[in-house]
Image (spheres, rainbow, N blue to C red):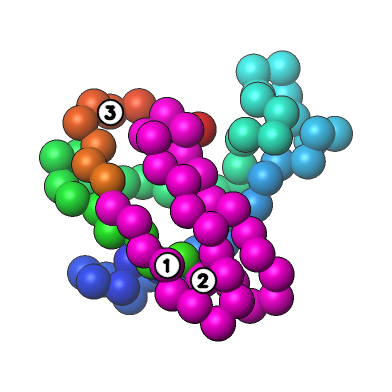
Amino acid sequence: EYSDFLNVEFDSYMTPTNELDLSGFRLLDVDNRTVLPMNTQIRIVITAADVIHSWTVPALGVKADAIPGRLNQTSFLMSRPGVNY
């Protein structure tokens, strides 16, 4: 969700292997990509409802764990456009 500026929420799930086209990346492509602003500090707040989850974007050097009952936050700055996995 983009809660600081807009009231926008959406879900994004990994594309199943049997639904990938030839140009897709297995275990990386999603059905609904997120658009992030450039040259702006981006803060991510992460939590979980059931078990520990790991949230990562290796191209940006960001990794954080979502732990039930806790809020975890990290921030990063996007300096160039592109699709980041």
Mark pair 3, 1: CA separation: 26 Å
User: Who is closer to the viewer here, 1 or 66?
Assistant: 66
Above or below, 27 relative to 42: above
The circle drawn on residue 81 is: 3
Residue at the far right: name it: 18
Let me know if residue 59 is in the magenta part: yes
Task: Please report contact status of discs 3 and 2: CB closer than 8 Å, yes or no.
Answer: no
Above or below, 2 relative to 76: below
Indicate the secondary structure of the residue bearing disc 1. Answer: strand
The circle drawn on residue 47 is: 2
Q: Residue at x 59, y 53 (%)?
A: 54
| The image quarter in which residue 8 lies | bottom left
- Mark 2, Cα crowd under 10 Å, few <14 / some 14-19 / many 20+, is some
Residue 33 visible within the image: no
Task: Please report contact status of discs 2 and 1: CB closer than 8 Å, yes or no.
Answer: yes
Task: Report the number of numbered marks.
Answer: 3
User: Of the residues shown, which amino acid type is indicated by label 3?
Assistant: Pro
Q: Quadrant of the N terminus?
A: bottom left
Mark pair 3, 2: CA separation: 27 Å
User: Who is closer to the viewer here, 7 or 70?
Assistant: 70
Image-based side of 28 in relation to 57, left or right:
right
User: Of the residues shown, which amino acid type is indicated by label 2?
Assistant: Thr
| Highlighted range, magenta | 47-75
Task: Give how far across and how far down residue 42 sits, in percent.
Answer: 25, 53
Q: Residue at x 21, y 69 (%)?
A: 5
Q: Residue at x 37, y 34 (%)?
A: 60
Residue at the far bottom: name it: 69
Above or below, 67 relative to 29: below
> Which residue is labeled 1 in the image?
72
